[in-house]
Image (cartoon, helix red, strand yellow):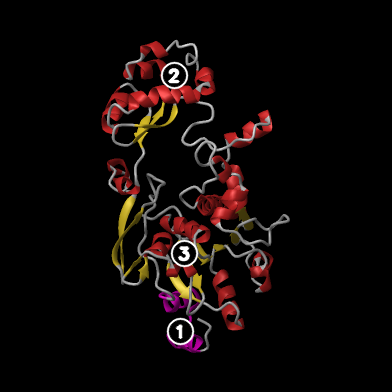
Amino acid sequence: MPGPLTGVRVLDLTRVLAGPYTTMLLADMGAEVVKIEEPGSGDESRKFGPFVKEVSTYFISINRGKKGITLNLKKEAGKKLFLDLVSQADVVVENYRPGVMKKLGLDYPALRARHPQLVYAACSGFGHSGPYSNRGAYDMIVQGMGGLMSITGELGGSPVRVGASIGDITGALFTTIGILAAICHARATGQGQMVDVAMLDGQVAILENAIMRTLVTGEVPGPLGTRHPSIAPFQAFPAADGQLILAAGPNHWERFCQVIGRPDLIAHPRFATNALRAEHVEELGEVLSVITRQKPVAVWMQEMLAAGIPCGPVNTVDKVVKDPQVLAREMLVDIRDPKAGPITVAGFPIKLSATPGRAQGPAPGLGEHTEAVLAEWLHVSASAVARLREEGVV
């Protein structure tokens, strides 16, 4: 079946993670994404491991399903080709530092003048306004500046980076949402617009209760390990053979106490209400940890689920990739790279009933589709592409 973005053409000027993740999602939803890279070098993430037969599987994992061309935007002939491609596109996505595209004469005002319906998306560390806009940023920088690291880690410990690159990925998700909204607007009105997403903004947007606690109470949140700041018991506990997450909210407390064989805790003077349990959370944790250590994770899971208590194991990644729920939802899919062979990648997480998205195929080799795209989009002949290649334009 066609995806929901079938027929949408995207020019992808992104590299490394936030931008490529954005355009990968668009490709998964059926858009024709053409990744534009510098001749000879390409996206620097092609050099990131792990490698299979000298092919970066990191690059494959976030650039699957795209076409790839090379184009030197520093040459006038390269700029002209890009502008010709823009006239045939619906969306341009870039994640350069603000100002780079303006120096090339290819920023949003320049492209809008030629193509008013164009959606132009820019994902950068700090956005295109504000005192930090010209700074470069990486994932950990925005995790730190956005407050996320200050609330991640063990109680009383040093700030800890979230294990996945959530600064980049959150930026990518918000950029994708902005692009989809702008496409809807362009189709309804004939007018495009610029989508300006800052990775730092994304970190602030996901702080949820931490911002409210600071603004409402004046309390400055810190790391709590696995604990929830206002619900207890709601954290990971030690089992006989691993870690078990127990999320017993106020409506589960009595059943929870019955399952662990401690009905006396239901009306305990320090644990009788959620507010009391949150106030005495360390004492509660000590009491419960003695109990949870007595059985393996699987046994606790069976008993808790039977009683309707939300729970789950703390899986290592090797267990995640074998989890039956993950597999049933097709969150691991195989694609075949021409050089590396079959590679397993994460699947598309949005399940659409009428226009399902999916991994569309392998990542492109550097400049793999240059001739095909220029021929299809601009009717450039193979001999003309050969001349452009000799001149270092493509």
- Kindly identify which numbered label has been placed on residue 33: 3
Q: Disc 1 on helix, strand or loop? A: loop
22 relative to 245, above or below: below
329 relative to 124, above or below: above
Q: Amino acid at mark 3?
A: Val
Question: Real-space Cα distance between discs 3 and 2?
Answer: 48 Å
Classify residue 300 by image quadrant. top left
Residue at image mark 2 = 251
Residue 213, position as x, y percentages in the image: 62, 31
Question: Real-space Cα distance between discs 3 and 1?
Answer: 21 Å
Question: Real-space Cα distance between discs 1 and 2?
Answer: 69 Å
Classify residue 59 by image quadrant. bottom left
329 relative to 6, above or below: above
* Residue shown at the point (34%, 26%) measured from the top left: 292
Residue at image mark 1 = 381
Q: Nearer the viewer, residue 58 or 262?
A: 262
Residue 150, position as x, y percentages in the image: 58, 43
Residue 123 in the magenta stretch? The answer is: no
Decide if residue 52 is in sight here.
Answer: yes
Question: Quick check: 122 left or right of 387?
Answer: right
Decide whether the magenta segment is chiefly helix, strand or loop.
helix
What is the magenta range? Answer: 368-390
